[in-house]
Amino acid sequence: MTTNFEELLEAFRAFLQFQGTSMARDTAASIDWAMPVRPLEPKTAPCIRHLDRIGDIVPESAQPLVRSLAGNREALCWGQTYTKEDFGLDFLDNYGWVEVFGTRGHFANDEVAGGFLILGPETVYPDHHHEAEEIYIPLTDGTGWRKGEGAFQVRRATELIHHPSNINHAMKTGVEPLLALYLWRGGPLAAKSTITGGMA
Ligand SMILES: [Fe+2]
C-alpha cells in the first residue's frame, strides 16, 4: 500500500480549481492549501468496498482524484456520524465519510473542512441539517438530492449542490453508489447533524 496524502490534497485542490462553477473555483481560491499534516490512525468503514465500482463510473475529470482516494483508502480515517439507532445497520454498511482537511481531518484547517462521502446503491440518507454551510460535488451520476421541502432531483456528476446553513437536505442513491466531494464552512465543522423526523 502506498500512502500519499499530499497527492490526495493536491488532487482535491486541482479538481476544485478546474470546475465549471465559480462557487467551486472561488472556494478553491479562498482556501489556504498550506495545511499542516495531522497524524491520524487509519480507521476503515464497510462503504470503502464501493470505491472499486465508483472508480469505473466517475467522469474523466474526477479520475485522478478518485484514483488517489482509492489508493489511500486503507490508510485514511473513515468516519460515521450516526449509529445503528439512528438509521439502522444497513445504512451503516453503506455510508461513510473521510475528512481530508478540517478540524479533525488528515490536514489541519480551522476555517473550512473538505472530504468525501460514500453512499452505497439504493441507500437513503434521510433529512438532516447543520449550521455549517455545505457544498457537495457528486462524482458519480444518478443520486437524488433534496433540499428544503422540495422533491428529490437526480444530479449529474460534477454538478455543484449548495446547502445554506441549517437547511434540511437528503440524498437517495439509485443502482450505483455515490461518491461526493464535500466542503463545509462557517459553523462547527465537526458537529453532528440534526436529524429531522424520519427513520431515527
Ligand atoms: Fe449535510
Image (tube, rainbow, N blue to C red):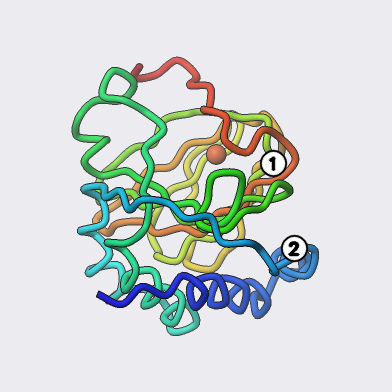
Residue that appears at 68% across and 30% down: 131
Describe residue 6's horizontal placement relative to residue 113 as left or right: left
> Circle 1 is placed at which residue position?
133
Q: Report the disc number at residue 31.
A: 2
C-alpha separation, residue under disc 1 versus residue under disc 2: 15 Å
Q: Position of residue 74 (x, y in %)?
A: 27, 61
Q: Is 198 situated above or below 131? A: above
Q: Quadrant of residue 140?
A: bottom left
Q: Amino acid at mark 2?
A: Ile
Between disc 1 and disc 2, whose residue precedes?
2
Describe residue 77's horizontal placement relative to residue 116 as left or right: left
Residue that appears at 27% across and 64% down: 51
Secondary structure at badge 1 equals strand
Point out the residue furthest to the front here. 39
Q: Position of residue 130 (x, y in %)?
A: 61, 30
Viewer-proximal residue among 70 and 166: 70
Q: Amino acid at mark 1?
A: Glu
Viewer-proximal residue among 87 and 142: 87
